[in-house]
Amino acid sequence: MRPSPPVPGARGVGAGSLAAPTLRLLACGALVVLASHLLPAAPATTASALDVAGAAGEPPPDDDELLLRIGRAAVAADDPVVGARLLKLARYLELGGTGEHADDELVAVAREVGLGGEDVVIRRYLVEAARLAIQRPVAADAPDEDAIREYHASHAERFTNPPRLRATHVYLSAARRGVDLERDADRLLDELRVHGASPEASRALGDPFVRGATVAGSEDALARSFGASFAREVAALPVGGWHGPIASSYGLHLVWVEERAPARLAPLEEVRGRVVHALLRARGEARARERLAALRRGSGGAGDDRRAGS
Amino acid sequence: VTDGPPVPWQRTEERAPCAAFDPLRQPLFGDLHVHTRFSADASIFGTKVGPRDAYAFAQGGSIALSDDDEQPTRSARLDRPLDFAAVTDHAEFFGEVNLCLTPGSPLYDVEMCRNLRKVDAPGERFNVTVQWLFPAGIDNPPKSHAFCSTPGVDCDAEAVSVWQEMQAAAEEAYDRSAACGFTSFVGYEHTASPFGRHKHRNVIFRNHVVPAFASSQLETAAEGSPQGVWNAVERDCLDAALGCDALIIPHNSNLSGGEQFEDPLDALDAQRRQDREPLVEIHQIKGNSECRFERLAGEGVGTEDELCSFEQLTRSHEGPDNDPPPSIEDWPARNLVRNTLKAGLELEEALGANPYRMGFTGSTDTHNANAGDVEERGWDGAQGNSDASPARRIANDLRSNPGGLTGVWAEENSRDAIFAALARRETFATSGTRPLVRMFAGALDGVSCDAPDLVARAYATGTPMGGEIGAVRFGASPRFAVLAVKDPGTPDVPGTDLQRVQIVKGWVDADGVAREQVFDVAGSASDGLALDRASCTPAAGARELCAVWEDPEFDPSQRAFYYARVLENPTCRWSTLTCKAEGVDPFAADCATQAAARGEAFADCCLTQDADAFFEPVVQERAWTSPIWYRPESIARVDGTLTPGRRAGDGALDLRIRLGRRVPGALVAGELPLTVIVEGAGELFRATYAAGGVPLEGDPADGVVLRVVAGDLDLARLGTGDASLRIRLESGPYRAEHVRRWRAADGVLGVAS
């Protein structure tokens, strides 16, 4: 497990540092419906949109700032997530002094002193909830067959399987052979070459290997099983003939590549589920961008949902 | 249905054949027990992410994890993606949970929904947990929470919607291309918890064909447990004739108060359990279920195995009547899988069928959707904000652990191939690391640790883990081959070397009493002990270990099981690593002083194994192979030939099946009907012989031979190469099987000698 990186949003929403991969998964969703009301399918009234977008003459807000404003406008006054955070802050800052106070009183005090607008966690929550609201797939996003085919073709790099190979290997165990490992491997390689041994014939040579004598898969898959350097070296071998010795996590290997397949775009039917999922996500993100741009222009919306691009 | 190389199971899917295919099978790692926000308890813990996030994480993507405040300010990523995974959310209250999480729903603002969403510290959520989950623990639960009767609310329809979303997430994650990079399974957890006794089971479906509704304990309680979930799976899947197939994996027997594995009603019930539940989850975040040994008392629950103090919880179930927990003498024996397997042997003596013929899986049971997140160093926790921070992990969840993984040996990374491996129990469980281990048993002619083709020979002359053998060497012990290699780890976190391989034997003695014994068969208990406690660097040990072993106390008349346990060298437990990272060294003389300076939450960093019966700051990670069962009444040997032919109708077979000595006398006397089934690429041959017409040869005193000759068969789908065949015999409650890889020569398949 890699250590958890610092939370990008911790530097503040306004810094534009929210990393979508980390935070877009936030599914609190408490603001979705209300935020959607601010962003109706039909062109919105300019009044509500301008309230969100800010007054004329101010510099145009960036996406995160705009989303924060949407979130603030849409949040329920007694939203439990915000309330819990404000309560925690109020207690931590001892806003109630030494007296006994009900939770809602402490939350009210926290709001009064502006914590609701300044706290990083609350700001991040509002931004992401607003982002979810405007990206959420709607029925009109469901793609037709032509759109699916077009997306598959135009994003071929995402649906292309990497090059792969299949090889037979003779394994020599470092644990069994110790200091003789390399000498034994060199000798066996010579024998294989001199006698023109076939992959099939080689299976009675070397040491027993728990994974068997077949090596197959992409370079990534081989790296996962045998280590990165082994995968790289095997990926560079020609088809046919004995090569090596190549070191892995287990010992040394003499390798005969039997088949190599180039990278190949997976046919649509093999990856249809992934294509549809990616397309829906792309449409949601595009719609969000359009709406934010429209709000920034002060028009309040990008038009009918059904025209959202892909 | 896709064509592909001949395989000893049926292809049921439309998908591309896998480019990486190995007839001698490759190891794949996965997690078959993962919860997301659709589980009520996960949502109470503050988990926000869903099934799609879980599958993305399993494939190497990042995931957002909640912090103490239930805010997703943490993230994690697997260094090594999984090969397969199943999201198994609790089916109880699927619909209610989603309605409570969906703004705008008619239930969104009801008190129970607000309680579900509100931020609670672990010690504050007892009431809301009871409020939500108590119905799953009573005899006659309501089908849904009372608020579902609100006008305009349809919790059942919402439950279907959640179930469909889980299916869609699995479908999107499944790689149907030739790359076969990742396999997802549709599944769910059926959560019977009678007064806190875990009778929990995961239902794993073979492919995309699944029931329209995930039947939970709320729907099946009246039919009993586990019979209710069996009924549901049989009615809605197996017998629905829609191409649906499923298996059920019980788990957390360590928290079942002895109720997870109760006696079967009769032989049919026993056989039904064996068929429905071929596997058991032996290790997960909420403890290990293999066996139990209390170190300070020097006593175990039916065992003297000191290695059974590994990752034990203090309670025998989670009901309010478990305080204090029972003493070691009164501990429920069948909370432990090894004891349950032994009980299965005893029950087979009495009933003729073994209800507990279970292979092993390991998983996480994470409630954070972080499938397979099992690394001890820097463990992220697994239960929302309950264990989100180091302080909470140490103070609240010291005895939890990062959980385990399931290893399978399968021809390819596809749903059909992995499901077939699960069904035949060719699996191993690990406590989270990724060593590889294979075990075979049989005559194993020519198999030795010096044979380069050990694996091929073993498949040809023995059966792999999960299977059964008869008296394969007449009165002599079968031979057992175990081959294990260390987890290679990653460049940043190298794997730990192996210390030893053990074979655990359970058997029923001449008095009908189940017993057990553990044999060290490779490596040594004295190896690899020199852990550097300052840096937590483990000692050097073996990269690989191999043994071909015979049971010195084998008695051909006594039924038994054998499984291998692979032990890594000692390493620092996750809690030790966490404490050290927080500035509290559990090994330091002034640990208490350091802990006091760091804060009250870290006091348990200084707990030692001399002061606690189970806690261990140093652990030995391990792997367990599924058992192989020796059955005196099983098939002793098969000889003969099978000719696939080139076309339908060209096939023929001529089999001589030697039966074991304890085959029912009436069967040997020809007084019972007998069905013979041969399976390869699907079912190849089936014949039922009437009583009096069973083709038996030989003298019953010497053991009889069943002679099966047939022609004009459609066997061409076996192809022209070697083939794995399974021969099954059925006669009433009597069953036996023989699994081998047959060798092809001149168009004829024969048994290797």
Image (cartoon, rainbow, N blue to C red):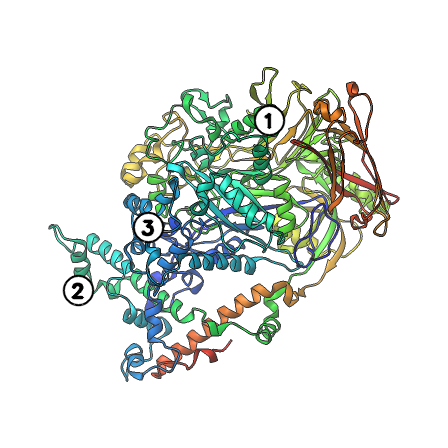
Tag 2 subunit: A
Residues indicated by labels 3 and 1 sit on the same polypeptide chain: yes
Amino acid beneath label 1: Leu
Residue nearest the viewer, comparing B539 with A295: A295
| Residue B351 - label | 1
The span from disc 2 to disc 3 (Cα, nearest Å) is 25 Å
Tell me the element at label 3.
loop
Residue to which mark 3 is pinned:
B68
Q: Is residue B454 visible?
A: yes
Tag 3 subunit: B
Which x, y percent locates residue B430? 54, 39
Question: Residue at coordinates 60% horizontally, 76% vertically from top-left?
Answer: A146
Q: Are marks 3 and 1 in contact (CB under 8 Å)?
A: no
Which x, y percent locates residue B396? 34, 40
Residues indicated by labels 2 and 3 sit on the same polypeptide chain: no
Instruction: Assign the C terminus of chain B to one quadrant of the image.
Output: top right
Residue to which mark 2 is pinned:
A112
